[in-house]
Every structure is written in structure tokens, then in C-alpha cells.
Image (cartoon, rainbow, N blue to C red):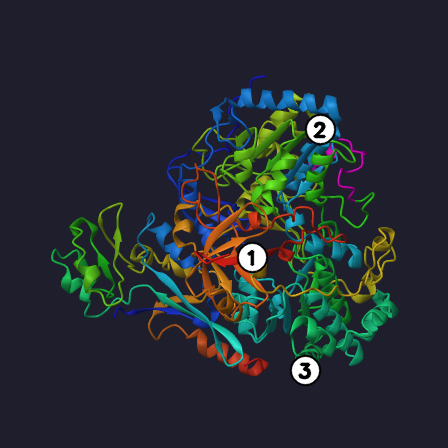
Amino acid sequence: MSKYILRHDEANCIGCQACEVHCKTNKGLGPGPAPCKIISVGPMMVGKRPQLRFVFMPCFHCEEAWCAKACPTGAMQRREKDGIVFVESSLCVGCKSCIAACPWGTPQWDPATRKVVKCDYCMDRLDVGLEPACVTKCVTGCLSFGVANEAPDPRRERYARQLVAGSL
Amino acid sequence: MSSGKAPNVCGVDSPGRRMVFSMCGMCATRCPIEATIEDGRVVWLQGNPNDKAMGASLCARGAGGIPFEYDDERPQTPLIRTGPRGAGQWRRASWDEALDHIADKLRETIEEFGARGIALSDRGGGFTDLTKAFVQALGSPNYFDHDAACGRNAHNAARSLYGIGRTAITFDLKNAKHLVLYGRNIVESLKVKEAKDFMAAMANGMRCTYIDPRVSITACKATRYWQVRPNSDYALNLAIIHEVLKQEVYDKTFVETFVSGMDALREAVKETTPEWQEQHTGIAADEIRTFVQEIAADAPKVIFHPGWMVARHKQSFHVSRTALILNALMGSIEVKGGCILAKTPEEVGQKGLKKLADRTPKVKEPRVDGAGTTRPQWDPASGILHQLYAAMETSQPYGIGAYFSYRHDPLTSMPDPEATKRALDNLKLLVSIDTRYSETAWFADVILPESSYLERANVLCQNNGPRPNFGMRDQAIAPRFDSRPAWWIFREILRRMGIDEALDFETIEELWDYQLEGTGVTVAQMREKGIVSLADAASITPRDKLKFKTPSGKIEIVSEVLAKAGLPSLPPYEVKQAPTGDRFHLLFGRPATLTHGQSLNNPILNEIAPEQMLWIHPDRAKPLGIADGDEVEINGGGKYSAYIKAKVTPMIHPDAVFMLHGYGATVPLATRACGLGVADQRLQHGKLYEFDPAGGGNAMTETIVTLKRKGAKA
């Protein structure tokens, strides 16, 4: 895995899909590719209350990335300094091997460039001290980004606040 | 008369990287935004962090502003109709030709109907000083907003109780302990700041009771969900009030000081026990008692939200009104964690924006819908739109000859567009000013392309609130097509009518200078931050200075205004028959990614738009032979029938079916939206003139539809 963690605090997520559009517009993508996706499951009854589950699916930036291993041209790479897995577009021949190889279907086909595009944690933004687009503009702040173990986990803090307020 | 291009704001064409503070235009919330421009192209949009409640956040629609801007499927020049109305035959026209044509038709209208025969509707909000000034300068009282199909019942309910409109009551969600929502789907019918505050409050332990016949995402976020029978929420509120009075958990000091009409209230809810409501709403009596104990413990930090889209049924006004009464009973008015009354700049010791409407004389003529005269219960500031259409058909109380629909699409937002078209077809002139091909634009005589919200500057807006501010929509980039900003369009029409004084400004900066005169705020300051707050912090009026703007100065449970209109302040609940067999109430709603009918043609929002499905309860689907995923034929009693896929789920009340609104567009030039899905408004057959008489809001969820599985025998 990369040294970073992109946290999705599901309890604070409203499934508004803003992250998907922030990602696409930042990368200048048209219809088709979706480097990140919020998957809603439900509603279903949990006890007496209806519940919805939201699963955020960007790229996991695997340590031993299937996609990079499958790439015949070396376009799919792992950045040495922080472990971000990204596509070097100039090397991509559009063979889609990475799409087939990824267990989560993360790499995306872009019909406009006829190449692959994927979540790279907006590394151009990271390199100038900014956060990924999805995190920067998330409506509720349920997405957070940082070096793993360095940033506090919002779930612990919320649990404590709700416990004290008695709304759990 | 010849008119050149509208002047761009200074520097809009300059190369390199620029940041512009502006205001989003992807829905009518108009969030403050910051746009990054590189060599004249918008490359990044985010919330304006100078507004702390907003931060950098932006919703999916707001982010969809970039694909919207660079999409060519929008009106690019003025268009004049050449075939029959709605046939889609147009010719391109220059601005001079289109504006001269409009002026000729306006003169014809004035000759036949007088100036009062001209009307305009928009979608309300912070920029209406311009549209109101335009209508007034022409000499007509007939400015309308869209709100008869939205929050008008809540608005007029607030006026009848507190003497102020709906938006003058704000909610301190962040500090509240309990929020009660009547279908106010706060995380899907999304306003960024409100949703942020709501989720932050939930994380801090706020309780939320959510009342809706359908499980929305907000229902899933709430701490309590009541699947109430459709259109029965007034019964629920009468029982809650009954129980609040019975348990004596209301704020006696507050009520004694500020509320009149408590005896009438006691009388009205004498019999409306929790048991009584159970037969109407389906909510267990014990649940009501527990709930009342809970809110008693949380008072005064309890908010009963009077609703936003409340054009639902013929007692919706009283649902909002009883919710607002409950706030008074909880003593949650003008307290932290409760309902905070909006302040004008003057109320915090500052000066408000100078109004454009002050430049021309007020119009004495009565409004065509009777708002404020024969219908004193309706706010005359923006009226009740369906009654404008009624006048187009009947010429009563007088005729209407010309109508401007400004960034407003009544053929999508009002029920029964066929009925609306019949009314509109009597006009001499129908002008649509818009940035997209709306259903109404397609039916118009002239389409005037307004520059997109990123390509234009608007008049400044004054946002009253606990902490009032001025907001600016600045121009971020030059227009891509032959479009113009609204202030320029209205000015040019007025000039052609020989009415120069109302909007006699050469540039938007000149207009802003006029608005800011005497406020101590400059255009440069506005540009520096996008918003300028007029107070250091939110202000709460101390109890000894609290007064209400009603005739009596108190919160009027028995309203003088309603009495004058011959309407009861506390009518009994009207019992509704549950539809059976193949008949259902039609409910509708919105996802967070779509704004009514205006987003579905956006290349990216179209891509992520949910598949429109018809939610139906398994107990009702089974006898009709409808299984999950089946195609179902749906009809609302009129000519329009459509097929839609069934989603069989217990998450919808058995009496109702539900679908998303904003689908079923018919304009062929909007290729992504055209023909996609079913138009719920076309199923609302016969509902254009069905409304709550007290609030004026349309009774949309009284619509009954019939269902048939595709291929099933009749």
C-alpha cells in the first residue's frame, strides 16, 4: 500500500456522489471512466431503523499491484517515494490488461483518449501541498486523507461525542 | 435600436491563472464558490472558503458546472419561433431583432390589456430585486416566483403566525438537540451548508425524527423514522400538540408572553389524541407519547422544520403551520439550537443594499392572482403562480398578454403541463430567458440565451440571516456564445419601451456601485472575498426586545390575516380515503445529483443519474402481479401514460408509489435528457388548479395514478 490513507467515514457519508464528479472534472474526463465510485447498498431494515450502506471505491494503491504487474509497457507504475500507483499516459497502449487484472475493477477505460485512467490520489495536487479533489470538496467531510496513522480517525471521536450526548 | 455586446467585467479575458469568487448557478441555493481560471478556461470550482460554513465543499451538481459550461447543447443565439408553439421550428435572430420583436409585442399587450397584462416568473432567491424592478418599471404588479410548486405553504404559514416569511426563520442545526423533519430530505434535496451542519450535528449527538411515507437517505440518517400514511401529517401534528398540552411540557413563560390564541388551540386538539391519529397516520399512539417526552427533555433546543417543498396536499399549509406552532410551544424561538430569526442589515446597525425597485414608482394596480387583496392570506411580494395561468385562460380578473419565464421552467415544475400549455397558448408573447433548452423555452415564442452563471455577473444580493451578508456573483469567464447577462437583457427591453431610469447602467460595476451606496462596502471588498458579512457574529434578540411582525405583535395561533380571508386558523383534519387496488398516491423526490429538470442533460450528471424506478410496496405489488424489475404502465388520469421499471420494496408506504422528478424531458436538442424516463408532472393530471387555499401551494401528492404490469390484461 502507499504510505497514505484515504479514509471514508461511512457514518458521515450521505452518498451524494460529489466525490465522483470532483474527481472526473479535475481530471477533465467525459462520460465513461469513473476513477472513484460511491456504491450505495440498501435501504434495508436493521432492527427497527432503515439503513443505507455506502462503500467508497477509489484505488487501494496496492503494494503488489496486480495492474502494474499486468501492464506490458510499464505505463502502470508505483511511485517510489510514496507508493502511489499511477498510469504514465504516454506509455499506455490501451490494451486494458490492467482493467482485467485488478480484482476491484479500479482502472478505467477512457474512450476519449483510448487509454486507461485511474485514481492517483491526485498526485499533482499532493505535490503542491494540496489534497485529492474528492477530499478537498467532499460535502460532509466524510473523506479525509493523510499519512496512515498520523491523522486522527474521525470515527473514534464521533463515537465519544455521541456516547456523551446519549444519542447512540 | 442597436445594441452591441454586453460589456464583460474588467480582466475577464486576461491570460494566465486567476481566481474569481462567485456564486454557483447549478441550483437555486446559489452557494458561494471560488472558480480557478486558466487562460480563460474554468479548471476548478470549489466552495468559497471565506464562508466558513461552506468551506471548499461543493455538491455533485456544483462540480457539474464545468461540464455544463463546456457543453454546446444550450441556446447559443436568440431564437424566434417560426412554426406552431412547441413544434420546435426556430430561426436565429440577432439580439436587436429579438429585442425589437419583444418590445413590439409588449406594446401590443399594453394596448389591449394595459401594463398589468405583462407578467414574469423566476425562481425567487437573492437576485429578485432585478426582476421585480423590471416588472414594476413596465407598470405591472405581476411578478411571480416558482414557489406555488415549492415552499409557498410554509411561507404563508410563517406569515400568518409570525408575520415574517419562510426564509426569515433560520434553524440553528449545529446546536440543536432534536430536529423534526416532515419529508424535508435534507441530505438529498441538498443545500451544502445545511447538509454539512446537519451531519455535524448528528455526529455531535443531535436526534432527528424523520417523517415520510418513503425511506429517503435522510430517513437512514435519522434516529427515528415514521413511515406515515401519505398526506396525513396534519393529523400527526394535531396529536403531537394534544400530547404536548396534555403533558404540560410547553414553555409556559414564552407562550404567555409571546403567543395568542392558546384557548383556540386547546379546543382544536381536544379530541386529537395519539390513539385518534393512529388510525389516520399509522403511527402507534405510544410512539407519539415517547416522542413528546423526548422533545420535552430536549426543549428548547428542538426544531420542527416547517418544510421546503410543501406543495403536497390541501392541508399542507396547516402541516407547516402546526410545525411552526410547535416551535413556539417548545420556546425554541430565538434561542441557541432553535429557530433564529433572520436580521436585516438595519437590524444589526448597518445599511442594506439600495434597491433597484426604488428607482421607479410602485404599481397601485391589484395583482392578477388577488394576493394581498382578495386573497390577503397570500404574500403579494411574489404571489401564487397557478392563478396567473388561470387568468390567462379566463381573463379574470383581467387578461394577461405577455409572460417572461426567466430561468424558470413551469412546464416541468408545475403539475399538469398540458393544462399550463393551454393557458400559455392564449398569450401574445411568451419569452423564455434561460441558459438551457427547458420544456418552457421549447414552447416559447422567443428564447433569449442568458450567459451561464460562470459567464455573467449578477446584481449583488443581500442575504438576511442571523449574520446578514452581501453576496456577489462575479463573471469568471467570457461568454462562449452570443448570450447576455440578465441585467443587460432587462435594461435593453426597458430602453426599447422608453423606460430608461429603472436600469440606467452601462456596466455591472456601475449597477453595483448604486446598490452599495451608503453601505460602506465597496465593489473591491466584495471582489476580494465574494461575501461580506455585516456582523461579527450571529445575533439573537434578547427576550425583552422580542416582537413579532403580526397585526397583534404576538405569535398569532388564531391569525387575523386568515380570519380576514374567511379561513379557519385551526381546521379539523380532513380524513382521506386510502387508494386501493391498482390506485396509488404518486410521490416524487430528488437525488442529490439532479436539480429538478435542469441537470439531466449535463454530460456528467446524466451519466451518474440514478435509474428512475417506481417504488411500490410488496403487499400492493403482488395482487397486481408486479415483481421487482417488471415494466409497469402508469397513468394519472390524462392522456399521458408511460412505462417505468418497478422497484418492489417495503421502504415505501403501501398507499403510495414513488419516483424521481426531473425525467421525461421532450426537447430534442437536449439529446441526453430527451426521452429519458417518465415525467411525474405529466402524471399530475388535473392538478394545476388544485391547491391549499390558505397557502396557495399546489396539491401534488393528492395525485392518484393507476398501475398495470406491462402486458397484463386490463
- How far from the left and from the top, in percent, is residue B44? 41, 48
Asked if one can make out residue B373 in the rendered structure from this viewpoint, the answer is: yes
Residue B239's quadrant in the figure?
bottom right
Q: Is residue B110 above or below residue B580?
A: above
Identify residue for label 2: B138
Q: In the image shown, does A128 or B252 lie closer to the viewer? A: B252
- How far from the left and from the top, in percent, is residue B442? 52, 34
Identify residue for label 1: B706
Q: Residue at x 59, y 74 (%)?
A: B206
Asked if one can make out residue B332 in the rendered structure from this viewpoint, the answer is: no
Q: CA distance from mark 3 to mark 1?
A: 35 Å
* Both labels 3 and 2 in a single chain: yes
Q: Residue at x 18, y 58 (%)?
A: A76
Chain bearing tag 1 is: B
Tag 3–tag 1 contact (CB < 8 Å): no
- Point out the stretch of residues depicted in magenta: B354-371
* Both labels 2 and 1 in a single chain: yes
Q: Residues within 10 Å of mark 1 (few under 14, many from 20)?
A: many
Element under disc 2:
helix
